[in-house]
Every structure is written in structure tokens, then in C-alpha cells.
Amino acid sequence: MVLGDIQDDLGKALADELGPNAIYQHANVRSEDHIKTLIELAVEKFGKLDIMSSFVIFSIY
């Protein structure tokens, strides 16, 4: 599993909690280049991309 987010501390902690088959990579989902990097990382690590999902949550203060 490849996780991408802009909150690096939380993303790294989640990847650590999920175990050795989880990788965290800093990524902003508004950046096409960042999304491409996540896909390339998944293919490099796992040989292919099976499923891709995006969950975007934001708050307005």
C-alpha cells in the first residue's frame, strides 16, 4: 500500500502502524506530478497498481 498526504508526521505514523507493506510518500493530491510519483512508487515496489483511491478532506475556518 502506498499512502500519500501533505501531513508527513501522520502519514509516516500510519505507514509504520500498517507494517512493512505500507509506504508513505509526501504528496499533494492537487499536483499531477505528485500523483504520478505515487503511481510510479507503487509499481516499483509492488510490480503493478491494482487499486487507486483518493480521499480528500478539508476544513474551512
Image: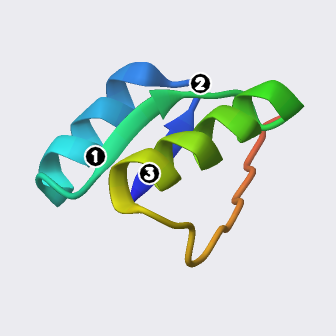
Q: Secondary structure at mark 2?
A: loop
Give 56 or 42, whichever is nearer the viewer: 42
Task: Indicate the quadrant where residue 38 lies.
Answer: top right
Give 53 or 61, whichever is nearer the viewer: 53
1 left or right, relative to 26: left
**Residue receiving disc 1:** 14
Where residue 46 sits in the image (x, y, percent)? 36, 60
**Residue receiving disc 3:** 2
**Label 3 vs label 2: CA separation?**
14 Å
Q: Is residue 35 above or below residue 27?
A: below
Where residue 12 sits in the image (x, y, percent)? 29, 32
Q: Residue at x 34, y 22 (%)?
A: 9
First in sequence: mark 1 vs mark 3: 3
The amino acid type of the residue labelled 1 equals Leu
The amino acid type of the residue labelled 3 equals Val
Q: Is residue 31 at least partly visible in the picture? A: no
27 left or right, relative to 48: right
**Residue receiving disc 2:** 6
Task: Indicate the quadrant where residue 1 lies.
Answer: bottom left
